[in-house]
Amino acid sequence: MDPFERRLREDLGGLADEGPRPAPLSAGARRSLRLRAGRTATASVLVVALLAYGAWTGVRAIGRSTSGPATGEACSWSAVPAPSADPTRYETFLRSVAASGPNDAWAVGTYNEAREGAGSFVEIQHWDGTAWTEVHPPAIETYGGPSVTGVAATGPDDAWAVGFNEEEGGGVSLAVHWDGTSWTSASMHDSSLPESHLFAVAALTPDDYWAAGGWAKPGDLRGGGLMDQWNGTSWETATWSAPATPHPANETGGPYELLNAVAGSSSSDVWAVGQSQDVPLSQSRTWTVHWDGQDWAIVQSPNVDPEPGTGNVDNSLQSVAAIAPDDAWAVGSYQLKGTRLAAPATHRPLAIHWDGGRWSVVPLPEVGQGGLNGVAAVGPHDVWAVGQTVENPGGAYSVSPLLLHWDGTAWSRSNVPVQGDASLSAITAIPGGGLWAVGSQGSPSRPMVLRCR
């Protein structure tokens, strides 16, 4: 069992172990779950359930479009070779990608021994306009293994990657910087919290980066959002937690929130998204917060709500793209939990749009079970989202990459030039034209890189 999952179950007093047991997942299904959660499943006890706040807007059902693969797209996708740690010994996962130009891109993630509970190692790869090559990460003192889950860059001599590191006293935020020559570890502000992790980072200027994540006090079953800002000299930390809903007298627990992604169109228009829950009472809900250049504010966001008598629905957001103050997208998934613990999973992709006044759910093509992990915008009428679909015919799980395109009117599914078991974790637009998308494929997992040009 993953050490983070084990600690989570311990902290929740065994709640995760109650109820009937589903059939064990195959190696491919376990890999899908890790890729699906990306910035959350491998984190730590922050992945518990995360707080529901305020009067959230709900929708009973989502209209689904039935269009097939998109036509007339702005670019064509192809697979690009990428290096991998020894596949006979390690599994390699790419979690995030960023590009400052056609000849400068970074992909980051982790690699670990292909067994449950194995420690992780930082994986960093660079595109120089000709090929992807591995780049040595900085030396990081660790107790259980560091993880890098987000990367952003403003130029060939300026990039930041963020994640978390397991130390003996708990998990701590991690940030490393590229100065054009080498990667070095940065000193992070001490939040005095037993668990703090970063999952994503966005670059506005060399002196203005935002990193998003979460903090937790596992023993108290509570946690909240975490934002770090780079001001050109140091990282400054801000934490908060939304009000908890009332608990019955015999219940314990508290609010949990988690921010999985951050993006901005300017220094006064930054969005961070994730999910929230009041442990252990309610299902998870979408959570969006906005920076106007002065303060962060929670913004009401929609959720897929259950039909009466069908059980709860978990909603979460995994990625965000900010195009303009009146144009932003966030993607993730929702899951009908049902009324029985042994009921099969029903994850479905979710996309919401900000029009300057409110967030609203936008219909997606019918793809079956699956979720979206990343979103990137070339322009208002050219937006892409990536993730995976999951099928389990006869109990054998099959994971396939998912690629969706917004043309200004509707979302449609696009063909992916990869065969076999695979998942896409992140996507980014390339200044000057095109996109990069990264993920993992095969068993044992190895890097997958796609380019649209």
Image: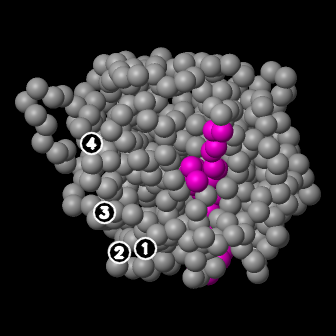
Q: Provide residue 305's location: percent of width, then percent of height.
A: 33, 57
Q: Residue furthest right?
A: 130
- Name which residue type carries label 1: Trp
- Name which residue type carries label 3: Gly
Q: Is residue 339 visible?
A: yes
- Name which residue type carries label 2: Arg
Where the N terminus falls, by quadrant? top right
Q: Disc 2 versus disc 3: distance between alpha carbons?
A: 13 Å
Q: Is residue 319 above or below residue 353?
A: above
Q: Which residue bears the numbered disc 4?
A: 282
Question: How many discs appear?
Answer: 4
Q: Is residue 163 left or right of residue 100?
A: left
Q: Which residue bears the numbered disc 2?
A: 358
Q: Provide residue 350's location: percent of width, then percent of height.
A: 49, 59
- Name which residue type carries label 4: Ser
Confirm or deny contact between disc 2 and disc 3 (CB under 8 A).
no
Residue 354 numbered mark, or none: 1
Mark found first going from the N terminus, 3 or 4 = 3
Q: Is residue 370 magenta?
A: yes
Q: Disc 3 versus disc 4: distance between alpha carbons?
A: 14 Å
> Of 94 and 421, which appears nearest the observer?
421
Q: Alpha-carbon neighbours of circle 2 within 10 Å: few (<14), some, or many (≥20)?
A: some
Mark found first going from the N terminus, 4 or 1 = 4
Mark found first going from the N terminus, 3 or 1 = 3
Confirm or deny contact between disc 1 and disc 2 (CB under 8 A).
yes
Q: Disc 1 versus disc 2: distance between alpha carbons?
A: 6 Å
The secondary structure that most of the magenta stretch takes on is: strand
Q: Disc 4 versus disc 1: distance between alpha carbons?
A: 25 Å
Q: Alpha-carbon neighbours of circle 1 within 10 Å: few (<14), some, or many (≥20)?
A: some
